[in-house]
Amino acid sequence: MNLLKSFISISFFTLISKIFGFFRDIIIARFFGAGIETDSFFIAFKFPNFLRNIFAEGAFSHSCIPILMEYKTKKKNTEIKEFISYVSGLLIFILMIISLFGIIFASNIIYILLPGFIKQKDKFILTVDLFKIVFPYILLISLATLYNLILNTWNNFLVSSCTPLLFNLVIILSILILSQYCSPSIFALAIGVIIGGLVQILYQIPFLKKINKFIIPKISISNSSIVKLVRSMKSGIIIICIGQINVIFNIFLSSFLSSGSISWIYYADRLIELPIGILAVALSTVLFPNFSKSFLTGNKKEFQKLLDWGLRICFLFAFPFGIIMSLLAKPLIFSFFQYKNFTNHDAIMTEKVLIFYSIGLLGFMINKIFIPVFYSIKEIKTLTIITILSCFFTQIMNLIFIKFFYHSGLALSSSLNAYFYSFMLYFQLKKKNIFFPLPGWNKFILKLGIALAIMITTLTILLHFFPFVVESSMIIRIMQLIFFIFMGSFSYYLMLFFLGFKLNSIFLKN
């Protein structure tokens, strides 16, 4: 299988999904702006997403993929089906209990974690109500993720890449159709989340049936592989929970900030997630099963080659994306969000966050590659220690930067922590003789550096002679933004071409 081809295919469908996700956020900004309602929804939605990192994309997926790959390689089809049945049954049972707990104790959870909302009675009540609606999403997205893992393990990457697209479409339709019937209208967004979660599950079922892997869930805690999975998840859960302390602490701090701060951070985060989702998540999706396979078969040479390839892809694209988002933060925010209920002040506040997030883009992307490596090689203890150190580092930065930069200080601490975390992961991989960069990195970085310098110069000159006009119409703003992005990207890749960079140098076949 050509890994670059798989990566490009997944990136393409992820791009389509992200475009719809971006369109979804534009509609949210237009309909609801940035204030009490959006703050309440984004905070309420953070909690199922917090657990999602444990029971979906985080500890669960990182622990489940190596076992699934082992079953696919060494076990009979009946054993594979039995494992899938028990995993899905256990997942549904646990998350139903958690969902009920969250709904019953919603007000207590908000009271403890968001003390800044207590004095704002309307905001507190609205957040609790939204929390009760969206919290069961954790069950839906976790089951959808399990189906994703199964399809990915059987090399059906495209189906799982399309599921977020459906989710975004449902959210958009919910806002457009249901908002006029809901009071307050933000409830339409919460209802859309639940419907979107159901649609993601239903969409994947026919494809699971096609590969004969749609199995009726059963519950068993005595199955040896389930026991192995649970034991593996214990360490993963500890790592995720430690890492999510940063999220909880950010939520705690943001509750004391002015209304709109949570929304400003959200909109900037959605922009920075665009390149991360298109590139880093797609890379991780393709590489993780192959990391596990290479480790299981003892093919260290291929393991090194895979990781080196993934890192070069990150460097090649993360640098220009980060520069574009930093230098063009104002055109990006004003072109896409600053309309109707999203005010000029909201745009300026969001712009500050985006600039700080763009600084850490490379670190965010590298971590998406490094973390699965540690799960593949079963170095969970090392990953736990690094995560703890990273957590302390972030909290120190949070307390310092929030005094000077307010809401955007949280973004700056996240960016600095991304580099600290990636450096610590790389240092340990090198120390344990697991990974050493292959030859050619010095020339590679030098060429990137020259191309980036040309790109920065090009964008600076363009911004000077063709300044972005906030008062322009939406069409003119977007056309000018596209012009800036095209010229910046063109200058970057054209210079790489003149420097002798060859695209086939990053082709990799498995």
Image (cartoon, helix red, strand yellow):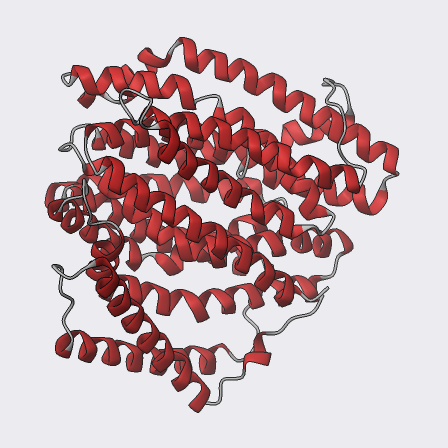
Q: Which residue lies at the image location 50% right of the left edge and 27% below the top edge? A: 138
In front of the other: 47 or 10: 10
Percent x, y of residue 111: 27, 15
Whether residue 445 appears in this view of the structure is: yes
Along the horizontal axis of the image, is 183 left or right of 461? right
Is 497 situated left or right of 224 in this image?
A: left
Vertical relation: 193 (above or below) 148: above
Near-viewer residue (59 or 89): 89
Q: Quadrant of residue 124?
A: top left
Which of the 4 image quadrants contains residue 265? top left
**Rendered location of residue 413, percent (x, y):** 26, 47
> Splitting the image into 4 quarters, where does residue 211 fall?
top right
Most extreme residue toward the top is 104
Measured as percent of width and height from the top left, residue 384 is found at 49, 39
Quadrant of image for the C terminus: bottom right
Q: Please tell me which residue is depicted at 48% across the width and 26% down the height of the picture.
A: 137
Q: Residue at horizontal 60%, vertical 39%?
A: 61
